[in-house]
Amino acid sequence: MNECSGVKHLHHPLVGDLAQPYEAMGLPSGPGLRLNFCTPEPDSREREALGLLAGWASTGAVVPSRRDRSGNDRSGNDRSGNG
């Protein structure tokens, strides 16, 4: 089995840049398949950001809109009343 670890650098449009430590293990039942485990450090900004996202997901709350440089809503929320 192939095992590796490192840090994945991700960008989320609402919480920004995240540096996620991970470990990956190959699956014996599927050559070329791996299972990745991402585990934020305790008391890190990443843990706080993921907790915020998990809280939004669990409540079904509308995620605040995030506008791009041209002023377009990039969150998928149409607040114009047209859709």
Image: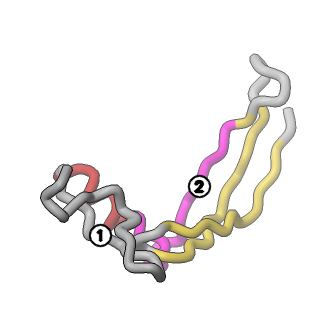
Packing grade of label 1 (10 A; few <14, some 14-19, many >=20) is some
Q: Residue at x 45, y 76 (%)?
A: 68
Does residue 48 show up?
Answer: no
Q: Quadrant of residue 74?
A: bottom left
- Total labels: the figure holds 2
**Which mark is nearer the camera, 2 or 1?**
1
- Which of the two labelled residues, at mark 2 and mark 1, occupies the earlier sequence position? 2
Please give left or right for residue 64 compared with residue 42 in the image. left
Q: In this view, does 54 lie above or below 24?
A: below
Q: What residue type is labelled 2?
A: Cys
Q: Name the residue under label 1.
A: 65
Does residue 42 show up?
Answer: yes
- Disc number for residue 38: 2
- Image coordinates of residue 59 in percent, x first then y, are 17, 52
Task: Residue at the far front: name it.
Answer: 82
Start-end of magenta stretch: 35-50
Residues 9 and 82: in front is 82
Residues 77 and 37: in front is 77
Please give left or right for residue 74 compared with residue 36 in the image. left
Q: Residue at x 77, y 20 (%)?
A: 30
State the separation of the CA atoms marked 2 and 1.
26 Å
Helix, strand or loop at disc 2?
A: strand
Residue 26 on the magenta span = no
Q: In this view, does 29 lie above or below 74?
A: above
Please give left or right for residue 6 compared with residue 80 in the image. right
